[in-house]
Amino acid sequence: MKSFSGFILYFIIIAFLISGCSSSSRFTSRNDNSSVTGSAAESSQIRVLMNEPSYFFTWTVESPVIVSADNRTIAVINIGNKIEFVPDGSDVNLHISDNKFSGKIISLSPKDSDKIKFNGRYYRGAIKFFADNNLLSIVNSLPLEDYLKGVLPLEMPSGKGNENFEALKAFAICARTYALNKLKENKTTFDIYIDTRDQVYGGVEIEKDITNKAVDDTRGLILTYNGQPALTFYSAACGGHTENVKNVFASGRTDLPYLAGVRDGDEPYCSIAPRFQWQEKYTQDVFISRLQSAGLIDNTDYRIENIEAASRFESGRVNELRITLKSGSGDDKIVSVFGNNIRSVIRTADNKNILRSNLFNISTDENGEVTINGRGYGHGVGLCQWGSIYLSREGWSYQEILSHYFPGTDIQKIR
C-alpha cells in the first residue's frame, strides 16, 4: 500500500474474475398480474451519456470515490484531488499525480454512501469513462428504477398533493418502457442521452417523494403490444387530438394501431396546460429568412404572395404548408414544408425554439406580416402529458389513462 497526496493506491494481487457472458436476462409480462420474456431485466443497469464525446476530461474529486479499471479496484481518492482522463484508442488513461493507469473502462463509485457527487450534482450508481475512436464518453451507470427517479420530476409536473399521482404513474410506465427499448439497442458505450434527445435526467437532487412513489408503485411495469414492449412517445399538450406516429416518425412505423392518434376530449383535456393557446408574429423579411436558412430558397429577394395550410392530418395538424413567393427577378416559387418539419423550419418568432406545434392557423396581412395562431405543445404522438394530468384530477386510474392514449396495449411486468 502506498500513499499519494491524499489518495491510497491498492495494488491488486488477484484480479476479480468477471464472467465474459451471462445467462440471458429476462423481463416478465403482467397485465398487472401477467409476465413476458425479453432481453432486459428490471434490475438492468442503464448507462446515461453525460457529455458530448471529448479528447480529455479533468475533474477535482467532490466526494470520496473508489476507482476501478476493468472491474479491478486500483485506488480510493479523497475530496480535492485532481485527476485527468485521456482516451487512447479504445483505452482510457487515468492520470493521478505522477501515476497513470489504463483500462477499457475506468469507473468511479461512491466510497461512503450510495451516491457520488460529480460536476456539482449527486448521482446514484457509478460514473464510468469509455473511449471510442479516441474520444472520451462519460456515463452514469445505475439501476433502471433509480434512473427513472431522476427523470420524472423533470418531465412531468408533480402537482399539489396527489392530484397528478395517477398521471405520474402512467408516465413512469411510459418512461420505463422507453428506457427498456433503449437498453435493447445494445449500444457500445451508452444506452440513453441525458437530455431531450431521449429523456431529461437530473440525478438525485431533483427527486421528489411523490415522483419516487410513482416509480416505486409501478416498479417493473411496462407497456406492451402483442407481448412485446410498445413504442412509447409523449408530448406536453396534444391540443385535443394525438397524432398518428407515421405522420411524425415515418420510417418503419406505419402499422402501430396503438399510436394511430385519438381524440382527446370535446374540450381538449390538455387545455389546462400553460400557454395551451399561443401566437407567433413574423415580419415578411424574418419569415423569408427562415425559408432561406432551411435551404428552401437561395436568396431573400422574395415577397410572400400567399401562404396556406394546403392539407391537414386527421388531427388538424398541418401536413403541407404552402408558400407562394414573388421574386424581384421574376423567378417566382412555390415552396412547401411538410409535417413536423414545419416546426424546425419556421421556428418561433424570436428564433430561440422550434414552433410549439404544427396544430395552427396561419395568415398574412397587407404588409406581409405573418401571424400563426396555434395550440398545444410538441409532436403530439402517444401520451398527452397535460391531458393525462387532467384525467388524473378527474379520478382516472393510470391503467385507464394508458388505455386511452395507447389503445390495445397491456401493462406487464418485467423480470
Image (spheres, rainbow, N blue to C red):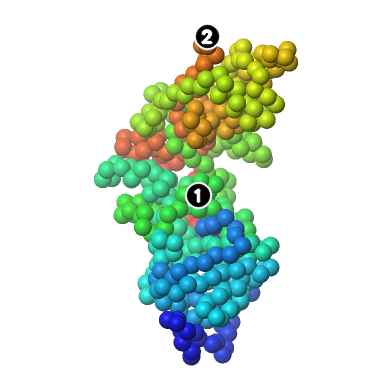
Q: Is residue 154 above or below residue 323?
A: below
Q: Position of residue 33 (x, y in %)?
A: 44, 54
The disc placed on residue 366 is 2
Q: Is residue 70 above or below residue 56?
A: below
Q: Residue at x 52, y 79 (%)?
A: 97
Callout 2 secondary element: loop
Q: Residues within 10 Å of mark 2 (few under 14, many from 20)?
A: few
Q: Position of residue 266 (x, y in %)?
A: 41, 23
Q: Residue at x 45, y 29 (%)?
A: 376
Q: Position of residue 183 (x, y in %)?
A: 57, 57
Q: Give the amino acid at mark 2.
A: Glu
| Res. 127 in view | yes
Q: Residues within 10 Å of mark 1 (few under 14, many from 20)?
A: some
Q: Gap between marks 1 and 2, in whole Å?
A: 42 Å
Q: Give the amino acid at mark 1.
A: Asp
Query: Which quadrant holds residue 258?
Result: top right
Q: Residue at x 68, y 27 (%)?
A: 296
| In the displayed structure image, the side of residue 245 where residue 127 appears, left or right | left
Between 154 and 290, which is closer to the camera in this rendering?
Answer: 290
Callout 1 secondary element: loop
Between 388 and 303, which is closer to the camera in this rendering?
Answer: 303
Q: Residue at x 35, y 51 (%)?
A: 211
Between 10 and 393, which is closer to the camera in this rendering?
Answer: 10
Query: Which quadrant holds residue 53?
Result: bottom right
User: Which residue bears the numbered disc 1?
Assistant: 195
Q: Is residue 185 above or below residue 24?
A: above
- Among the two numbered marks 1 and 2 on one chain, the one whose residue lies closer to the N terminus: 1
The disc placed on residue 21 is none
Q: Position of residue 305 (x, y in %)?
A: 62, 12
Residues at discs 1 and 2 in contact (Cβ within 8 Å): no
| Res. 225 in view | no
